[in-house]
Image: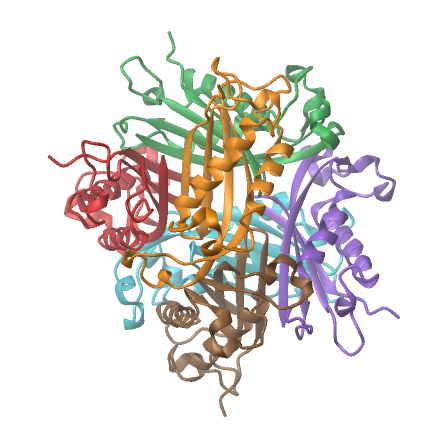
Chain colours: A orange, B red, C brown, D green, E purple, F cyan
Amino acid sequence: MYAINVRDHFMIAHSFQGAVFGPAQRMHGATYVVDLELRREALDSDGIVVDIGLATQVLRETLAVLNFQNLDEMPAFKGRNTTTEFLARVVFDHVAARIANGAMGAQALPSDSGGGLQHMKVTLHESHVAWASYEGALPVRP
Amino acid sequence: MYAINVRDHFMIAHSFQGAVFGPAQRMHGATYVVDLELRREALDSDGIVVDIGLATQVLRETLAVLNFQNLDEMPAFKGRNTTTEFLARVVFDHVAARIANGAMGAQALPSDSGGGLQHMKVTLHESHVAWASYEGALPVRP
Amino acid sequence: MYAINVRDHFMIAHSFQGAVFGPAQRMHGATYVVDLELRREALDSDGIVVDIGLATQVLRETLAVLNFQNLDEMPAFKGRNTTTEFLARVVFDHVAARIANGAMGAQALPSDSGGGLQHMKVTLHESHVAWASYEGALPVRP
Amino acid sequence: MYAINVRDHFMIAHSFQGAVFGPAQRMHGATYVVDLELRREALDSDGIVVDIGLATQVLRETLAVLNFQNLDEMPAFKGRNTTTEFLARVVFDHVAARIANGAMGAQALPSDSGGGLQHMKVTLHESHVAWASYEGALPVRP
Amino acid sequence: MYAINVRDHFMIAHSFQGAVFGPAQRMHGATYVVDLELRREALDSDGIVVDIGLATQVLRETLAVLNFQNLDEMPAFKGRNTTTEFLARVVFDHVAARIANGAMGAQALPSDSGGGLQHMKVTLHESHVAWASYEGALPVRP
Amino acid sequence: MYAINVRDHFMIAHSFQGAVFGPAQRMHGATYVVDLELRREALDSDGIVVDIGLATQVLRETLAVLNFQNLDEMPAFKGRNTTTEFLARVVFDHVAARIANGAMGAQALPSDSGGGLQHMKVTLHESHVAWASYEGALPVRP
């Protein structure tokens, strides 16, 4: 199995609901350094997992929607705790949709035959001592 | 699959038995920077893998038993080579037992239905060029 | 010249005033990983720059005042842009005052004869690609 | 599952063929910081995954063949794009062959019974924001 | 003294002349992860050392001239060993000239009165075990 | 001012005397990841600060004396607390003596005219949250 990883970051404000969060129930914020890992069984015809330029661009565009935002005010997150693990899933879903729409090229499209990208992992580093991730198979488009 | 990771460290002295260890057969020591990764299929009702505060506390308490010790003098390690990979397993077993006893909360308890924490990985970094880990499924308590 | 460094972190929300800040004029946030470096010409009678336990504690207590806060609502920062470099200075001043009050022990007190701690540097890492610092001589108490 | 990881690096020149590579079609180069991870189910009789000295030596000898080379001029890579993911596979294959030849010792030999090393991952970090890897089961020698 | 640091990278091919370089006399290459540190005594009217967006842009534009190049073929480096420390100076000189031309804004201009940026340090990391830097005062424009 | 840095590590056991050290009064140990930084005003005739191969070798030979040792049993450290900052000085003095003896080559010799290496900094990282250093001018040999 081959994999490539690209890294970027975003900075947001938010607050949490629930006693388990203690002082993090107050409005605060975080820098998330994001690792996007993409895996496939065999390299494409250019000898790569995916065009690293496109992967970097898709990640940047995905994070741009969140960057410099107060997540408490974004309708998409209404009533949700935007924890690090939750946000890892949000980034995963956005990037997966972009891949399915061809944003990383035709050879990156997941397919029934096992070609294309197969698996993705999104890791959000919130400090030098804590991070969270979401990973899973990339859905094949019907 | 979701995961969170917390990091801490401990510092110990020890020596190894066996020609394979070369100069490490002498009394020496190490700093181990420890990563504790916990995975589960679905987030709990608070939108988290586990309370990161509790995970940090359980890890710290586990490492406190080893920190600033000469492992050669600890009865638990009598006749064993306390290698980095061996110690990763020791930390794994201690933390797994604490999780099973509810130290990370009721929602973290591994269960037959696949709820709760499912998988754990413990990595011990012994230098900038070497580390070791032990990982496995978290046992469901009978 | 000897130096020791201890590391901790804090997470805050804030917004900036001024066109130069672009989208950072919106409410957002950051994780700051903080390095506190302390220097002196000669080691104290215990063979150390300062008790690393006390240095860690003073740093943690200093950051606790800022951690999980919306800096826009703190009276101390009224009308100020709480940029990374500005906050480095804030941490510097708080820690310097604690040192002057003996929080790191009698041997750490800066003195006219050049004994004690002499110089401090506070670095705030806001991402994997950007950080800021403030450094200067530690004032000798009259 | 236990794992150990050792790290080394090599520096090469190369160029790529294909419009997807943009300016990287020109002769340029890279430093690759290499992580070699080896996994097995149970520790050997010395309480280790593998002799870390031997693992380090095998990795160094493998990278020495590539280090300070212009990969475009190496017959083995004729007509191939020596991308980061491709090179991860090259290192994987070389190290796997050395393991099969006993270079990491008799206890490291993969076996049908599941003893010995079972799985290997090779990661090549090409910058602070990009890396690639190849991983797979280690073949059991007939 | 305040400082800010931004990070970027570039990838090049080159070879060295002189027995001291051993195998590095062959055509090879490197990734350089670059840290650009800028210092000044007092913050500007926005409460910053310099617009971090401009600093990032000037660094990127400077490195773009070198990125994906064979330095042996660049006229500017004819007959020179483009060592890591030499390249740190090259980046320093290019960025210093851009600052003097106002590329980081009017408030960043070094001045006789000690206002503006005063000191710069450029560090090039060539691997996880080696880096080099050049630093010095920023010249005041006549 | 130019600088180069090389990195290596060593692993030791020791214990401390003095209530200030708390549990570190027990026999324990540490991994020290060591950065050796060398500075000079002008590059030598090869365009380098110093032969990085020689710098790496001198550092490795210096650390070999300490590596895998119980520092409490080394006569050189009798009655001394081998703290991180103290050990940084020990490494500094050993390397400085080797430089003065020509171990890094004739062009590296510190001289009255300001040629050769001028300044050295030795940093010992004892964990991901603590490190210490010693730095100073390199003595000119009479």
Closest to the observer: F55 or B115? Answer: B115
Closest to the observer: E128 or E39? Answer: E39
Q: Name the image quarter holding residue B138.
A: top left
- Does the rendering let one see residue A125? yes
Give the percent coordinates (x, y) of residue C115: 48, 81
Residue at the image position 30 percent from the left and 12 percent from the top: D112
Give the percent coordinates (x, y) of residue C20: 69, 63
Q: Is residue E51 above or below residue B100?
A: below
* Left or right of D65 on screen, residue B104: left
Residue at the image position 76 percent from the left and 58 percent from the top: F42
* Left or right of F85 on screen, residue F105: right
Give the percent coordinates (x, y) of residue B29: 33, 50
Q: How many marks?
A: 0
Q: Is residue C21 above or below residue A53?
A: below
* Left or right of B93 on screen, residue A40: right
Residue at the image position 83 percent from the left and 43 percent from the top: E77
Closest to the observer: F66 or B31? Answer: B31
Q: Is residue E63 above or below residue C26?
A: above
Residue at the image position 53 percent from the left and 49 percent from the top: A66
Q: Residue furthest left?
A: B142
Q: Residue furthest top?
A: D142
